[in-house]
Amino acid sequence: MRVGVLTGGGDCPGLNAVIRAVVRKGVSEYGYDFVGFRDGWKGPLEGVTMPLDVAAVRGILPRGGTILGSSRTNPIKIEGGVARIEENLKGLGVDALVAIGGEDTLGVAKALHELGFHVVGVPKTIDNDLNATDYTFGFDTAVGIATEAIDRLHTTAESHHRVLVIEVMGRHAGWIALHSGMAGGANVILIPEVPFDMDQVCAWVDSRFGQSFAPIICVAEGALPSDGDLMTKDATVDAFGHVRLSGIGDWLASEIERRTGKESRAAVLGHIQRGGTPSSFDRVLATRFGLHAIEAVKDGAWGTMVALRGTDIVRVSLSEATATLKTVPLARYEEAMVLFG
Ligand code: F6P
């Protein structure tokens, strides 16, 4: 059997660990050979490949990014896109695809599966917002990086008696903000799921200064004030209809300064959260996902995605995985709120 592998969407620490596990087990246990598709769905769409054998995956376990490259190409939106993929797979003799990605990449995988393609999915996103899996790899690394940043901001905020706002990733789901904010002891955590009230935020800021400490506000990029809108860079959208978010951290800092009179600064963590070496938790999860994904290929379990349930890796349908996003439940946010201010 010849298996194609691709990584799509925003990159994420642990992608290389999945690729390595898929190839190593596929070669040694099942005698498969592999084709690496470049840059997400662009690879099969344009027939752009790279060699993918045991030699190609040596030494990549701890490396961030993806040796295959990534993109947000959506072949379903391109006229004749599906037919081109079919033709290219046929031409290359590829019998099955392992698609490693988030909601968008796996949404395409689901659509192709429904058209008869042999596809197995692996969930990836630092945002941890994919349904049907308890965790995605990349999340633990991102939370670790954001937590370290918060630890560092505490000392400079205290030295200068300033408010420090840290903006972390999370378009629709506030998992990174919630976990890093909690781990780093942020005094306010703001997430997309719960629009915030500026008066309340300022009251928390004041109460923190009342205890003679400087407040740290951890905000997800997709958070929004109850009487305002999402802050975007411009009006352009990507192939999956997503706007580029930007600006909530800076806006919050200046609004807090204006309302409370306390000097405020913002730090935007951005892609630092996505780059670099994966944590050991993510390496293990990514490796286990890879080992189980190639087993799903061997079993012909097309249209499934590997998922973490508790400590077990199970198979779920791509439809279940992509039906809705896994956002932060209100009760989880309220749990953290007890420590605000
Ligand atoms: O989808 C993951 C994510 O990290 C989001 O949290 C963020 O909005 C987005 O990627 C930004 O990605 P890029 O800058 O690559 O378009």
Image: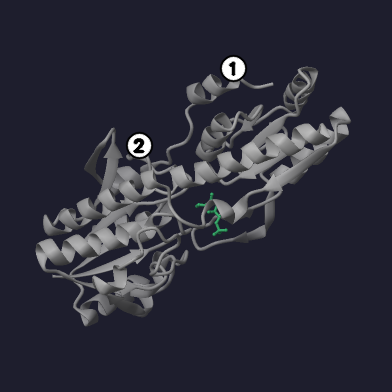
**Residue 284, percent from left and from top:** 31, 47
Q: How many discs appear?
A: 2
Q: Is mark 1 within 8 Å of ligand 1?
A: no
Q: Residue at x 58, y 41 (%)?
A: 148
Q: What residue type is labelled 2?
A: Asp
Q: In which quarter of the image is residue 184?
A: top right
Residue 10 in percent (x, y) is at 48, 58
Which residue matches tag 2?
Answer: 134
Q: For the residue with label 2, is its CB less than 8 Å from the closest atom of ligand 1?
A: no
Dot label at residue 289: none
Residue 7 appears in which quarter of the rendering? bottom left
Q: Along the horizontal axis of the image, is 282 left or right of 199?
A: left
Quadrant assignment for the C terminus: top right
Residue at 59% in and 17% down = 338
Q: Distance between the residues labelled 2 and 1?
A: 24 Å
Asked whether the beta carbons under mark 2 and mark 1 sit within 8 Å of each other, the answer is: no
Q: Can residue 228 be seen in this view?
A: no
Amino acid carrying mark 1 in the image? Val
Residue 28's image quarter? bottom left
Mark 2 lies on a secondary structure that is loop
Q: Provide the secondary structure element on which disc 1 rests.
A: loop
**Position of residue 82 measured from the top left corner of the image (x, y, whole percent):** 33, 70
For this view, does 174 lie left or right of residue 199?
left
User: What residue is pinned by disc 1?
Assistant: 338
Visible residue check, residue 4: yes
**N-terminal label among 2 and 1:** 2
